Image (cartoon, helix red, strand yellow):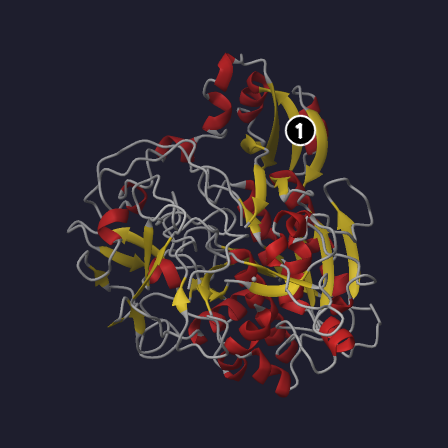
Amino acid sequence: MLTTSLVVGQQVPLSTSPETPREQSAVWGAFAPEEAAKISSELTRPAKGGNSVDEEVDVIVQYHETSTDVAEHARKRGAKVKGVLGNGVVARMSRAAAANLANDPNVFYVSPDREVSVAGKIDYSSTTVGADKAFKSGFDGRGIGIAFVDSGVANPGVNIDLQDAACTGASGRYVYSEDFVTWNPSGDWDPYGHGTHVASIATGNGCVSKVRSGANYEQAPGIAPAANIISLRALDNTGKGRDSSLIAAIDRAIALRTTYNIRVMNISAGRQVRETYTKDPLCQAVERAWRAGIVVVVSAGNNGRDNSMNTRGYGTISSPGNDPFVITVGAVNDKQTAIKSDDVLLTFSSKGPTLIDQYAKPDLVAPGANILASKPFGTYLQNQYPNNTLAGDWQTLMPYEAYFTLSGTSMAAPMVSGAAALLLQKTPSLTPDQVKARLMKTASKSFPSQTSWKDPATNITYTAFSDLFTVGAGYLDVKAALDSTDTITSTQSAKSPRVRVRADKKVETFNDTSNVPSGRTIVWGANVVWGNNIVWGNTVLVRASNVVWGENVVWGESTISGYSIVWGSNVVWGESSPYSESLSVKGEN
């Protein structure tokens, strides 16, 4: 998943008070004023190049829950409204007008319409996570709609892996498409190639290989090969978009939820975190979908090697993956085998805690190295990375245009989306929180204590440790999740755990009920439902140590590598530190 630069902040001393967690870490920066503000500092600080306050910029204006005609309200205050988005508008206006609009009591928050970009061997990966066992049990995602907010999904007429699972040529699974880049009501194309690849990982049927190659090669299907596909194109032909295009696509999925039984949404895209998730318009959009009953799965980002903050990649989860309500997915390398025992961590996978709010992310991990899946012919990615296309004589082995490999957390997220579809097929009554909790509880907790990878181009060695902020609750296990009967009540939230620094400079989780609807409780905390008062069962593997993840558990710097870096008092936030992308990487091995 391509992202842009890190959030800007400043050094602050490390607080010693455990009662004020938002002031306890240098990776928060000085955000007390920002939280109280109603406009992003990006719009109020001097523009680059000396542009005046009269410079026009694209903004997203979020309103409080009122009956106000938001479009008309914004126009009267100098905005050129481009569209209505959920609880607000996207508009063009001067910096001065934006600042004045933010002072209006009806306005919740004003932020720039920021750029968003995209974040792959399914023949082994679906088996590695246990999807083959799900197929044998009769679960294939049938009847469940998965919305892909991405660069589009190619028309199944030219990509039969997205047709019916029986390989009859029927394309009834592709139920809806719309383009929010060109605003074309029919968006059944993918000039970039990313969205089709992502959709194939979740819902591909492997039919191209079966029809064209016979017994010579057979591509395993995706995680939920009978699930219905809803293509919501929000990224252009170079993999870039805007907050507004993603938000429009997310809101369309919410509107169509009942029509197409959209129970899952996959977003393998994101950008840098700029403010608390409670104000970030992308995060607020995915929360609307979550509250509407849609399981939202988001890639964590590919920024785990970024050391621009001197955190060795910690604190690089991107938005909207930083939202604690949704499922955020990191990536591991399955080594192209069907077993997990040889799998290793991927150093490019983004790590928590989330900037500003400090939630433990990712929630879980799935395969994301050299994932083989479908691509439409002649796409940007195919042309950019021709060596990623499966090699061989297409007449006897594989049609050369059918499949190629990509790497990244973008590829890991749709595996979890497919798994969510299987759980909902088996038990349609599950809520998004119940799906998230079950996937996290049943995730495998076995990892190597650390994995190192040397970049041949720079000779820099990167190391990832299997701690809370790297692997989350563990490794996706589809079979274990389907076999589980554990659940949580409808009044409980699976909001991701939050972490803070104690007065003794050690790190602990705590029960964070902020922003949780009245009358609801958090699953993980002092009295969790999973038994033995421990959220994930008896133990959680954290850096090769069995550490209980509970309300009062404290980890010191000597226990988990990396914490002393994340929680140090001298972390500097970079202003323009571009993240690296792993689309062309042949894998860390």
291 horizontally vs 192: left or right:
left
Does 425 sit above or below residue 497?
below
Q: Residue at x 54, y 46 (%)?
A: 270
Amino acid of disc 1: Ala
Q: Residue furthest left?
A: 504
Is there any visible trace of residue 511 in the rendered image? Answer: no
Which residue appears at 31% of the width and 54% of the height?
Answer: 499
Residue at 52% in and 81% down: 479
Residue 60 percent location from the top left of the image:
60, 33
Say which element carries label 1: strand
Residue in front for this viewpoint, 291 or 29: 29
Q: In the shown orientation, is residue 218 left or right of residue 318?
A: right
Q: Nearer the viewer, residue 238 or 292?
A: 238
> At 70% from the left edge and 54% from the top edge, which residue is drawn?
253
Furthest residue in direction front, as rendered: 393
* Percent coordinates x, y for residue 11 in the rendering: 28, 33
**Would residue 504 be visible to someone looking at this image?**
yes
Seen as rendered, the residue at the extreme bottom is 137
Query: Callout 1 environment at 10 Å: few (<14), some (14 to 19), or many (20+)?
Result: many
Residue located beneath label 1 in the image: 91
Q: Quadrant of the C terminus?
A: bottom left
Q: Is residue 494 above or below residue 27?
A: below
Give the x, y percent position of residue 462: 33, 53
Instruction: Using the image as rendered, state which of residue 44 and residue 331 is in the foreground.
Output: 331
Image label count? 1
The location of residue 6, given as percent across then percent down, is 42, 38
